[in-house]
Image (cartoon, rainbow, N blue to C red):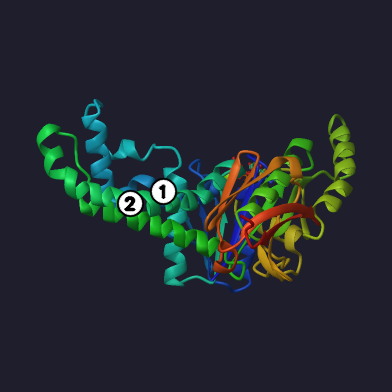
């Protein structure tokens, strides 16, 4: 299965571009599904159909789906949600309906990401197009499995061991709801699933991300940051999309918008090189329904297959050197003063601004120490050598 992941700042046209991409894939004969990880679902509006929690056939070869957190909670994570509501109730909240749990921030996106794994495992579709939430949230969510895996690998064994000892006592001294093994098992299962989702999304033979932007300063900056962070987390990006390009024949105050866009256009080409740039004009009305989405797809892709890998770049790689290894992490748009490194045994923690990524080091590197790092061609080269005492 091929996965195309669209992200970008709020309102730039992610949903429209994702829907147009999915439609074109379907028109080319791929069995395609498009799903939105954004809690504020607008995919249905874009396609002009009412979507549900299960895939719905919306055009020949094209299915679409909007994840409903409540539905997911009830059908798949009943034990966990019961425990959480017991716990919240015990903490003083009156009774908590399961429905209220689904308003925990990120729940909708989380379940949508888990849905990606389901589709990947079932292999019923050739192409999966993901309409992701605006950049920051998506990246936070995508880094979650890493964080959770870290906590789980360190704390779960302890928690389990403690539980054996504490549970009989705890029952007597407090009426706090105690996690049972089923809940722990479900939590572990959810985390395993998230780890699997991340593995799927960072498999560059399966998934590529595409960053949608408009020709505006703030939007371009955010697109640059997304590219840095996506690279940091090991996601391959194979194109950027410039949407809402104004035609030259506009007048009134749009004439100055046009002038501004003309100024940014060549800059964008330089900035995102060597990534291909897909372009779409500013339509004279909102893009709703398959007819207009098909026109948007023409503008974006022409005769190109949207499911193709539009660029194949390296994500992280390891190079053998004379006396050690170098780890090369592409970090476009980052600068040395923003990057901080810390090594802890088999892990390397790379921080860029407030984003932190823990890279679990391969055996060949874990035995060595990260002694130095420098930037080279938009990539951070970390030098690993035998540790000096
Ligand atoms: N090229 C375009 N020309 C004209 N209108 C457009 C264009 N692209 C998108 N739109 C319209 O702009 C609005 C926002 O687009 P869309 O919902 O695709 O953005 P989004 O990035 O998904 O937004 P959000 O961050 O809120 O999810 C929609 O009404 C859509 O029809
Ligand atoms: Mg959207």
| Residue 53 shows in this picture | no
Q: Which residue is mark 1?
A: 151
Q: Quadrant of the N terminus?
A: bottom right
Vertical placement of residue 154 versus 322, above or below: above
| Residue 102 shows in this picture | yes
Residue 104 in percent (x, y) is at 39, 37
Residue 364 in percent (x, y) is at 59, 68
Q: Residues within 10 Å of mark 2 (few under 14, many from 20)?
A: some
Q: Is residue 144 left or right of residue 217?
A: left
Residue 366: quarter of image:
bottom right
Q: Secondary structure at mark 2?
A: helix
Residue 105 in percent (x, y) is at 44, 38
Q: Is mark 1 within 8 Å of ligand 1?
A: no
Q: Is residue 89 left or right of residue 332?
A: left
Q: Is residue 297 left or right of residue 68?
A: right
Residue 172: quarter of image:
top left
Tell me whether circle 1 and circle 2 mark residues in contact (CB < 8 Å): yes
At a point 12% along the width and 40% down the height, the residue shown is: 169
At a point 64% along the width and 68% down the height, the residue shown is: 307
Q: Nearer the viewer, residue 24 or 183?
A: 183
Q: Quadrant of the C terminus?
A: bottom right
Residue 218 in percent (x, y) is at 74, 36
Q: Which residue is mark 2?
A: 156
Q: Nearer the viewer, residue 334 or 17?
A: 334
| The residue positioned farthest toward the front in the image shown | 389
At a point 63% along the width and 72% down the height, the residue shown is: 28
Q: Residues under labels 1 and 2: Cα distance?
A: 7 Å
N-terminal label among 1 and 2: 1
Q: Is mark 2 within 8 Å of ligand 1?
A: no
């Amino acid at each position: 299965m091929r996965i195309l992941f669209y992200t970008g700042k709020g309102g730039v046209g992610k949903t429209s571009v994702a829907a147009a991409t999915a439609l074109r894939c379907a028109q080319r004969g791929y069995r395609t599904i498009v799903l939105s990880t954004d809690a504020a679902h607008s995919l249905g509006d874009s396609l002009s159909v009412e979507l549900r929690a299960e895939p719905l056939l919306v055009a020949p070869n094209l299915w679409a789906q909007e994840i409903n957190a409540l539905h997911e909670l009830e059908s798949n994570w009943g034990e966990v949600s019961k425990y959480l509501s017991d716990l919240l109730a015990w903490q003083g909240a009156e009774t908590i309906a399961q429905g209220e749990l689904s308003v925990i921030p990120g729940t909708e996106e989380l379940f949508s990401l888990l849905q990606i794994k389901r589709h990947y495992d079932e292999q019923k579709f050739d192409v999966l197009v993901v309409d992701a939430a605006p950049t920051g949230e998506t990246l936070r969510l995508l880094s979650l499995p890493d964080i959770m895996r870290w906590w789980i690998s360190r704390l779960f064994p302890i928690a389990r061991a403690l539980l054996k000892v504490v549970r009989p006592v705890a029952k007597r001294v407090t009426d706090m709801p105690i996690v049972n093994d089923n809940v722990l098992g479900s939590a572990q299962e959810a985390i395993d699933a998230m780890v699997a989702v991340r593995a799927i999304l960072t498999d560059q033979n399966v998934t590529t991300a595409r960053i949608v932007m408009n020709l505006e300063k703030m939007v371009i900056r955010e697109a640059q940051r997304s590219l840095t962070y996506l690279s940091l987390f090991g996601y391959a990006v194979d194109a950027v999309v410039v949407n809402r390009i104004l035609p030259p024949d506009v007048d009134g105050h749009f004439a100055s918008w046009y002038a501004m866009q003309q100024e940014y256009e060549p800059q964008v080409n330089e900035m995102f090189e060597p990534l291909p740039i897909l372009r779409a004009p500013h339509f004279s009305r909102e893009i709703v329904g398959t007819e207009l989405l098909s026109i948007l797809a023409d503008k974006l892709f022409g005769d190109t297959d949207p499911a193709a890998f539009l660029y194949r770049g390296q994500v992280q790689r390891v190079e053998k050197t004379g006396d050690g290894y170098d780890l090369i992490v592409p970090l476009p748009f980052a600068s040395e003063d923003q990057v901080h490194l810390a090594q802890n045994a088999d892990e390397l923690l790379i921080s860029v601004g407030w984003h932190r990524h823990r890279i679990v080091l391969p055996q060949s590197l874990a035995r060595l120490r990260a002694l130095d790092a420098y930037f080279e061609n938009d990539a951070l080269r970390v030098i690993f050598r035998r540790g000096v005492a």
